[in-house]
Every structure is written in C-alpha cells, then in structure tokens.
C-alpha cells in the first residue's frame, strides 16, 4: 500500500480529499438505493447498486491515475480537435438520445454493443473548459481583438451550448457561468464580457419565444419543464418537483444534529432520485447536521487545494486549467446542496464523487486527473530544482575541498622556501 501511495504524484491534499469523498459515498449510496431496488417489484436488496457504485469509483480512480500521468500540456492541443467530435456526439444525442429513469429529456447516449449509457454534455463541458483555457493562455501576450475572439472563442462555445440547451438548461447555465468566470480571471476585457452576456440572454429569450410559437415540437419540450420548475419554486403550486423538495426537507429536518444513523433513513423509500440528485438530503437525515457540514467542509478544503495548485502553477495554461476544471466541480456540489434545502429550483445536478452514476464520476475523475497532472508537473519542477541545488552544493563542496588542498600545499612549499632562504635556520637544522 505504501509503495502504491508513493507512486501517486501531484498534490497529496487533492488525492486525500478525493479519496475521503469517494470512501464516504459508499454508505449513502448503499442506503439510498433502496428506492431503486424496490422499483419494478424488486426485493429491496441494494447490494447490487453498491457493487455497481464500487465498480464506477474503482474505474474513476484508475482514470485519475492514468490521466495524471499524461503531461497536461498535451490537452491543450487535444481540446481543439476534440470540439468537432463533441458536436457530432451531441448532435447524435439530440436525435437518438436515451431516456433514463423516465426523465423527460434525451440527455443520454447508448454506446452500441456495450450497453453503457453516458451523458455527453458532461464530456463536452470538460473539453470546453480546456479549450477556453487554451485560448486565454495563447492570447495573454497579445491585445485581444473582439472580432477575432468572437470567431476563435465564442462561436465554438455557443455552438456547443446550443447542442446542450434544448435538453439540459441547468447544465448549459452552469457551463456558461463557469466560462464567464474563467475569461474574467484570464483578464478578458470586461466590455467584451458584457456584450457576450447580453448576447447570451438575447439568444435564450429568442429560444423561449420560438418554443412558445411551436409548443408541440419535441425539440422544445424541456422549456415547459423549466417554466414549471421556476413557477413551483416561486409559488406554492404542487408538482412532482415540489414533492421531491418536500421529502428532501422532511429528511433534513429528521436528521437534526447527529442524524438517525447509517442506513436508517426513512425518506429514502419515498424520495425520487435519492441516490443521485437528492443524496445530500439522505446524508443529512442519516448523519445529521454534523455529517452535512462535514461533506460541505470536504468540498471547501478541496476548493482550497485547487486555489493553491493554481497559484503554484508556473504557466498560465496550467493556472487556468486548474480553475476551469476545479471550480465547476465545487460549484456543482454547492448547487446540489442548495437544491436539497430549497435555496434553488430543482436542477438535476449530482453531488460530485458521492452521487451514484458512472458518467458523473468518470467525468469528474478525468478533470481531477488533469488537475493533478498540473500539480505533478510543478512537483517535478520543484524536485528537479532541489536536485540541481544539491548537485550545485556538492560541486561547490568539491571545489572548496580542492582549493583548500591546494592552499595547504602552497603553505607547505612556502614553509620549505622560508627555511632554505634563512641561513640561521640551516645552521640550527644541522
């Protein structure tokens, strides 16, 4: 085990907090999956869901390990040629997407001959964040021309978001917000950011108006879901989402300070998506306020390590990659928790590294692998600098020793010459 840990390079703090979140996830997933286990006249045995989650987490850590071995600057080029592939995958998903668990959106794509479904929007977000970081690092030394940035940066961004928006507004809004944060940190001119934000609002308004003009079109079916969620959040009108929130609040209220105990949740049997979208409510019910704050604390500590890693990165691309991939992860966790306590409308965002689901875990692990790859590079540079300093110190000691030896030899020669030059010393010696 010690040998394996020594082979893990990069920021040990990030490794530790990720491992803690993953290890903690097993008990809530094992407990909260009972709802799924009873569906379709099941037996209620959640062991299969636990083993499935174990397989997802194990594959996720393998992904982190192998991705962090890849030099992170390789992803700079990969992001550019991956975008067209992402558009093709998203286009196929819009046409032939799979409905999972009765969801009113074809967000998932079934891989032929494998039987695995994945959510392409999560993969598209990763590629887009690295693509934006690449552009900002490339233009840092040059003045930004808005027309050029529109063509090189914002057109690819908006094309990607156009593919995601019809089926998943919350993910689109999250990605767009994180990109705006990234370009702000990357010192993209504020006046241009204002133009982009205004353009985004106009485009969304136009999309909603078109959906009103063609209400029966399948392409715009999710717009009604957005409207109902916002309306239910702002009013007391009963709805399925309102039912989920009510059960989540009951679960949180039942947990009190110390919780009911692991596996003793009652609301897991009634709360839909209790092992994914609303798993935080089950965590608070079983582990209490202490458990809920503990999970929040782990995410904040992970955010702190991301800030440290970004600060230590010696390249602008490395700094922006850590921010672009790390901050959305934490922001998504905050959104999930806020939904559970009714601070936000239902969004369908999972709790990273804790909620069940292969796509969410694997995409998060790819992002973590790239981030750790950045910290690994800085660690290698620091190690090289230490070794160079040690070699320089050893060389200096060797030079000092040789100089000391030569000086001692010269002193001996001077002593002999002094004796030979003084006749009195010669007589005394005889």
Image (spheres, rainbow, N blue to C red):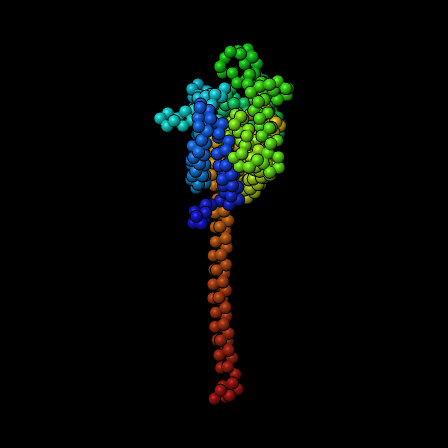
* Residue at the (62%, 35%) spot, across then down: 256
| Residue 293, quarter of the rendered image | top right
* Residue at the (48%, 69%) spot, across then down: 405
Comparing 263 with 341, the one in front is 263
* Residue at the (50%, 70%) spot, across then down: 407
Comparing 57 with 380, the one in front is 57
Residue sitting at the far left = 113
- Residue 198 lies, in percent from the top left, at 60, 22
- Residue 38 lies, in percent from the top left, at 46, 26
* Residue at the (50%, 12%) spot, across then down: 217
Comparing 286 with 407, the one in front is 286
Would you say residue 165 is visible in this rendering? yes
Comparing 29 with 416, the one in front is 29
Where 145 falls versus 7 (above or below)? above
- Residue 220 lies, in percent from the top left, at 52, 16
Would you say residue 307 is visible in this rendering? no
- Residue 340 lies, in percent from the top left, at 58, 29
| Residue 209, quarter of the rendered image | top right
Residue sitting at the far right = 235
Where 244 falls versus 409 (above or below)? above
**Numbered disc total:** 0
| Residue 68, quarter of the rendered image | top left
Where 381 falls versus 170 (above or below)? below
């Amino acid at each position: 085990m010690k040998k394996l840990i020594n082979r893990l390079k990069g920021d040990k703090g990030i490794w530790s907090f990720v491992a803690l979140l993953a290890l903690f996830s097993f008990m809530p997933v094992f407990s909260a999956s009972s709802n799924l286990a009873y569906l379709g006249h099941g037996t209620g045995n959640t062991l299969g869901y636990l083993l499935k989650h174990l397989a997802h987490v194990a594959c996720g850590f393998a992904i982190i390990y192998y991705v962090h071995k890849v030099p992170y600057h390789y992803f700079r080029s990969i992001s550019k040629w991956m975008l067209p592939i992402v558009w093709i995958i998203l286009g196929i998903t819009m046409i032939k997407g799979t409905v999972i668990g009765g969801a009113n959106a074809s967000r998932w794509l079934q891989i032929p001959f494998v039987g695995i479904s994945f959510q392409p929007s999560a993969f598209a977000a990763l590629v887009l964040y690295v693509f934006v970081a690449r552009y900002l690092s490339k233009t840092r030394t040059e003045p930004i021309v808005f027309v050029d940035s529109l063509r090189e940066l914002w057109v690819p961004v908006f094309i990607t978001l156009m593919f995601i928006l019809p089926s998943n507004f919350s993910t689109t809004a999250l990605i767009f917000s994180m990109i705006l944060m990234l370009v702000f940190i990357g010192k993209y001119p504020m006046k241009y950011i204002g133009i982009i934000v205004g353009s985004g609002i106009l485009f969304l308004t136009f999309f909603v108006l078109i959906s009103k003009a063609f209400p029966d079109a399948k392409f715009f079916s999710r717009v009604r879901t957005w409207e109902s969620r916002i309306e239910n959040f702002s009013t007391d009108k009963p709805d399925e989402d309102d039912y989920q929130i009510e059960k989540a609040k009951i679960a949180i209220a039942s947990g009190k300070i110390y919780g009911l105990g692991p596996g003793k949740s009652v609301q897991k049997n009634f709360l839909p998506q209790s092992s994914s979208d609303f798993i935080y409510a089950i965590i608070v019910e079983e582990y209490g306020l202490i458990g809920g704050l503990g999970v929040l604390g782990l995410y904040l500590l992970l955010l702190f390590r991301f800030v440290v890693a970004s600060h230590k990165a010696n390249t602008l691309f490395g700094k922006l990659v850590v921010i672009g991939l790390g901050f959305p992860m934490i922001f998504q966790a905050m959104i999930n928790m806020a939904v559970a306590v009714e601070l936000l409308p239902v969004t369908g965002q999972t709790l990273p590294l804790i909620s069940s689901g292969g796509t969410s875990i694997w995409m998060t692990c790819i992002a973590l692998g790239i981030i750790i790859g950045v910290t690994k590079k800085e660690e290698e540079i620091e190690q090289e600098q230490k070794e160079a300093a040690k070699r320089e110190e050893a060389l200096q000691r060797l030079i000092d020793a040789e100089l000391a030896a030569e000086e001692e030899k010269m002193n001996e020669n001077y002593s002999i010459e002094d004796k030979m030059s003084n006749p009195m010393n010669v007589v005394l010696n005889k």
